[in-house]
Image: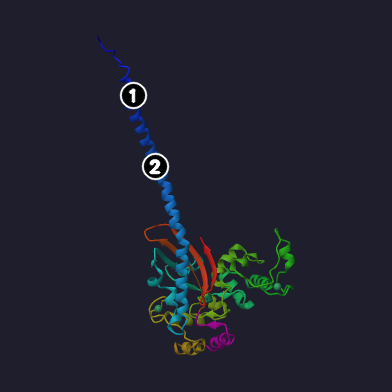
Amino acid sequence: MLKPRNHPEEAPQGSILIIALWLLFVLAALAVAMGAYIAPQIAIAQRLKNNALLPYIARAAIFQTMNKAARDAAPGDGMRPEAWRRNENEFKESVLGQGVFSIMPSAEDALRFPEAFGLADEERKININKAPREVLSRLFQLAAYLSPKEADRVTGAILDWRDPNKNPRQNGSDNDYYQSLNPPYSCKHSKFEIIDELKLVHWVTGDIFERVRSRLTVYGEGQINVNTADSLVLQSLGCSAMLTDQILRFRAGPDGGEGTADDRVFAAVEAIPEILQKGGGISAKDKEKLKGLILGGWLSTGSSFFSGVARVHQAGSKDFLDVSFIFGRNKKIMAWSEA
Ligand SMILES: [Ca+2]
Ligand SMILES: [Ca+2]
C-alpha cells in the first residue's frame, strides 16, 4: 500500500522548522535594526556625558590661571606683561587631568593680539567710570572719529549717566530723553557695571560702541598701566604723539618690536621722565604732561584685572567649550560667560 504523499504527521515538522528559521531571521534583522537605531543614541549619550565635564574643566583651568596671576603679584618680574600676555608654554593646550585648555584673548582683544595665548589686562584701557571728560572726549575723537562737538555731547551723556546727580550738565542728556524712547527707560545716575551699558547712552550708536569698546573698562582704580596701554589710549590721556612714541619705543626694547624677549618695562611711574630723558630726551611740554599724569595718579606700572577666554576639550575629543572670564589678582571672579 502506498503511503500518502503528504504524511499528515511529517508536514507540521517541516513547517515548524521553516517557521523557526524565519523567526530567527526576523529576530536577527530586528536586532540589527535595533542596534543601528540605538548606536547613535549611545554615542550621543557618551558625548553628552563627556561634554557635561567641560564646564568643570573650564572652571579648573580658570582657577589655575587665576592662581598663577595672583602669585605674580609679588613686585618685580611678575609684573612683566609677557609672563601672562604671551606665554604659549603655560596657556596653549595645557593638560589638566582628563581635560586640555588654552587661554586666549577675548574677541575684541584678539584684534590686538591675534596670535597670542594668554591673558589681557583691563588696566591698559580707560576706566569709563573714573576717566575725566577730556580723556573720554579724546578717546571718542581718536577711536570713533567724532568731531570735538560730537565727542562733547557723547561724553556729556556718559557723565550724566554715571554720576548720581539727576540734573543734566551742559550738553548732557537727562531723563526726559530716555523716557521719550520706545520702550522708555531711565537715565541710570550710577556707575557702569558692564561696558555694554554704553549702548543705552544717548548719542552712542552701534558703530561708535564697536569702535571704542576695546579701549574701555569698568574694572580697576582708573589708573592706566603704562607698560601695556596702546598708542591710542596713551594719546587719549593727553600724551603727545612724540611722547607716546617714546614710551612705546622704550617698551619695545632694542629690537623695536613688542612681544619679544628684549622688551622692557617701567618699574615705577616716578622713574618714567628720567628714563625717557636718558633715552633721547623729551620736550619740556611732554615732561610737564608726564608729571601731571604721575602726580594726578593716572598712571601705574602693573595690572590687577585680567580677561580672557578659556577653550577646553577632553583629550582625544574635538568638542570644545569657550568660557569668557574676567578676574582680579585678589582671586575674585568678576565676569563669567559660557558660550
Ligand atoms: Ca546723573
Ligand atoms: Ca622687543
Quarter of the image where ligand 2 sits: bottom left
Label 2 CB-ligand 2 distance < 8 A: no
Local SS, label 2: helix
Q: Is residue 223 left or right of residue 184?
A: left
In this rendering, does residue 171 appear at all?
no
Amino acid type, residue under disc 2 in the picture: Ala
The quadrant of the picture occupied by the N terminus is top left
Relative to residue 23, is residue 75 depicted above or below? Answer: below
Q: Is residue 156 left or right of residue 113?
A: right
Q: Position of residue 191 (x, y in %)?
A: 64, 73
> Label 2 belongs to which residue?
36
In this rendering, does residue 191 appear at all?
yes
Which of the 4 quarters of the picture holds residue 135? bottom right
Which of the 4 quarters of the picture holds residue 145? bottom right
Which stretch is magenta?
283-302
> Label 1 belongs to which residue?
15
Nearest the camera: 327 or 314?
314
Q: Position of residue 118 (x, y in %)?
A: 44, 71
Check residue 308 for magenta coloring.
no
Estimate how packed mark 1 is, as few (under 14), some (14 to 19) or many (20 or more) residues with alpha carbons within 10 Å: few
Cα–Cα span, label 2 and label 1: 31 Å
